[in-house]
Image: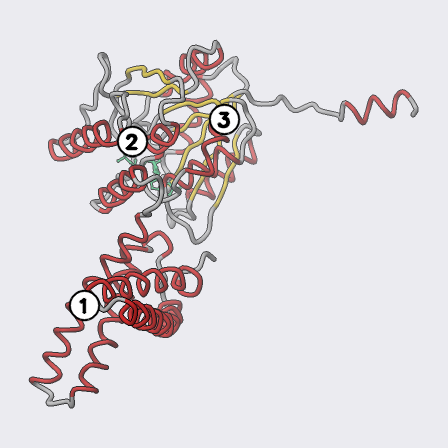
Amino acid sequence: MNGILRLVIENPLDTAIRPVLSVVVPTFNERDNVIKLFEKLKATLEGIAWEVLYVDDNSPDGTWEVVRDLARRDGRVRCIRRIGRRGLSGACIEGILASCAPYAAVMDADLQHDDTQLPRMLSLLQSGTAELVVGSRYTAGGSAESFNKQRASASAFATELAKRVLRVEIADPMSGFFMIRRDRFEQLAPQLSIQGFKILLDIIATARGSLKTLEIPYRFGSRLHGESKLDPMVALDFLGLVLAKITNDAVSLRFLMFAMVGGTGLFVHLGTLFVALRFFDLPFGKAQAAGALVAMTTNFILNNFLTYRDQRLKGFAILRGLAAFYPTCGVGLFANIGVAFSIYEQEPIWWLAGATGALIGVASNYALSGLFVWRRR
Ligand code: GDD
Ligand code: MN
């Protein structure tokens, strides 16, 4: 082959400087913060080849437009706009995997995390002193003074629980501010949960002590603009994550919530049955059918608000979802009765047959709902 041609093929024209550090910033309604954060990063990371990826879940305030605009003006900025999805952990995972720098940092958009720690975090990784560096509020020199009492005690409780149950040893496993080696992250990524807020805890618990981890203190500041997205439901996500990790991912939060919602359906069913018999004088068959219909409907609504809140159906999609949910439950009921019967025939223990049937029914409903009702768009 011609020498020059070979040279070109082996060394494609490559003028862009490859970033060493990717800063991943999940955003939801952070329109007023993203530029300010970029300016800060520019000053702090002077002399380092870096890039910033904002991962925006199609914020109603148009954060992605502001980021897109910024990206047009500066090649170090990238915007990932996700449609029909919500979730802090999922956004961080997607951001890190969309970059190629050997080191990735995750931080909030609202300036609560201290960007001036980034160079130090990077050099700790580059020198091999650590594979994961965590910005910590709870080691000497760190603080979370912007927390109100309620949030401070919730945070302390969750941290304690995580440490005991998951045997996580660092002081601040709930931190949302950290930097990690890409290769280590890529190894763990397939096992991480995209649901929830606690990606760092997930990384540490999944690595099971195999990640060389270092904490450095920082002061968790106050949010610049906008408001926190951490709502009480985050606590549920957290419990789900803990449960998933102790059962080695056998039990997912979604399944647990789905089953719990199913449990409430029983009460709704009995309540409706009672009202239909007592106050509407319906014959038993019709009353029982009404109970089932009402219970399926409330189950659908609860699942749409809780179990699948990150993929919540809205508008017309609600009707379409409901129309798919009824037959899904029908199949579940069929499986339930079929399994219960065959167990009962072999071993006439009523509660064993009943409980196994119910479990199979829930599992079937869950699997089919994920496929036909709340399917990923
Ligand atoms: N893409 C995306 N999707 N981003 C989200 C979502 C979402 O569903 N929810 C929140 N974010 C973004 C916010 O826009 C913000 O940039 C960042 O994630 C953190 O959300 P905040 O609402 O500011 O959370 P916080 O300040 O109450 O708590 C944060 O800091 C704690 C302490 O470090 C979180 O990072 C916690 O996980 C952390 O414990
Ligand atoms: Mn914040």
Q: How many marks?
A: 3
SS for dot 2: loop
Residue mark closest to the camera, 1 vs 2: 1
Q: Position of residue 216 (x, y in %)?
A: 32, 15
* In this rendering, position of residue 249 left or right of residue 349: right
Disc 2 from disc 3: Cα separation: 23 Å
Q: Are marks 1 and 2 in contact (CB under 8 Å)?
A: no
Instruction: Pinpoint residue 157: horizontal percent, then vertical percent.
Output: 16, 32
Ranked by sequence position, the earlier of labels 1 and 2 is: 2
Residue 171: mark in rendering: none
Q: Residue at x 27, y 65 (%)?
A: 358
Give the camera-side residue of 136 and 242.
Answer: 242
**What distance separates the C-alpha of mark 1 from that of mark 2?**
46 Å
Residue 89 position, x and y percent, is: 38, 39
The front one of 242 and 90 is 242
Q: Nearer the viewer, mark 2 or mark 3?
A: 3
Pick out the residue farthest to the right. Answer: 2
